Amino acid sequence: MEILIYVLFVVLLGLGALFVIPRSNSKGKGDAAHLAGSGKTSRSYTKKEVSTHNTRKDCWIIIKDKVYDVTAYVEEHPGGDDILNNAGCDSTEGFFGPQHGTRVFEIIEDFCTGRLKD
């Protein structure tokens, strides 16, 4: 019986540690640390450069001064071709619209390819 209590104590202690250990600060922020961690190189683009990526087979968007290559996501987009309305342009307003569930906010940083030049 004592052994069971000790095992239970250790398991609960381990589970408690999961809530105490801080998570990475770079997760979901898309900053240079996140880009480096995902194997992508942080790069800066002009609006003119981004504007050339405006087709279904080459679709980039800008959200809050970050550049995202969402080409691989175009066919999966639940809103169909709506994602192409802002291809090569700033999509910040549409991105934060009420139509997006939480999933899009979780996956978007996977598509970040750099920042917009000042």
Image (cartoon, rainbow, N blue to C red):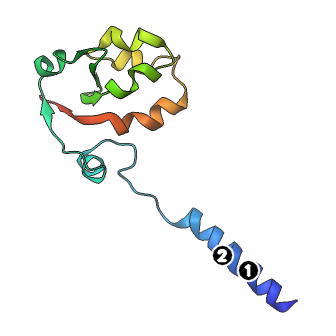
Q: Residues within 10 Å of mark 2 (few under 14, many from 20)?
A: few
Q: Residue 6's quadrant in the figure?
A: bottom right
| Residue at 35% over, 42% down | 29
Quadrant assignment for the C terminus:
top left
Q: Nearer the viewer, residue 72 or 37?
A: 72
Quadrant assignment for the N terminus:
bottom right
| Residue at 84% over, 91% down | 2
At which x and y percent is residue 35? 26, 46
Q: Is residue 78 above or below residue 105?
A: above
At which x and y percent is residue 99? 53, 16
Cα gap from disc 1 to disc 2, whole angstroms: 6 Å
For residue 103, which numbered disc appears in the image?
none
Q: Nearer the viewer, residue 108 or 53?
A: 53
Mark 1–mark 2 contact, CB under 8 Å?
yes
Q: Is residue 47 above or below residue 11?
A: above
* Secondary structure of the residue carrying numbered label 1: helix
| Residue at 34% over, 8% down | 85
Number of disc labels:
2
| Amino acid found under the numbered disc labelled 1 | Phe
Q: Is residue 65 left or right of residue 93?
A: left
Q: Is residue 51 left or right of residue 37?
A: left
Q: Which residue is mark 1?
A: 9
Q: Residues within 10 Å of mark 1 (few under 14, many from 20)?
A: few
Q: Which residue is mark 2?
A: 13
* Secondary structure of the residue carrying numbered label 2: helix
Q: Residue 24's quadrant in the figure?
A: bottom left
| Residue at 40% over, 15% down | 94
Q: Is residue 33 above or below residue 100?
A: below
At which x and y percent is residue 114? 21, 36
At which x and y percent is residue 104? 47, 30
Q: Residue furthest right?
A: 1
| Amino acid found under the numbered disc labelled 2 | Leu
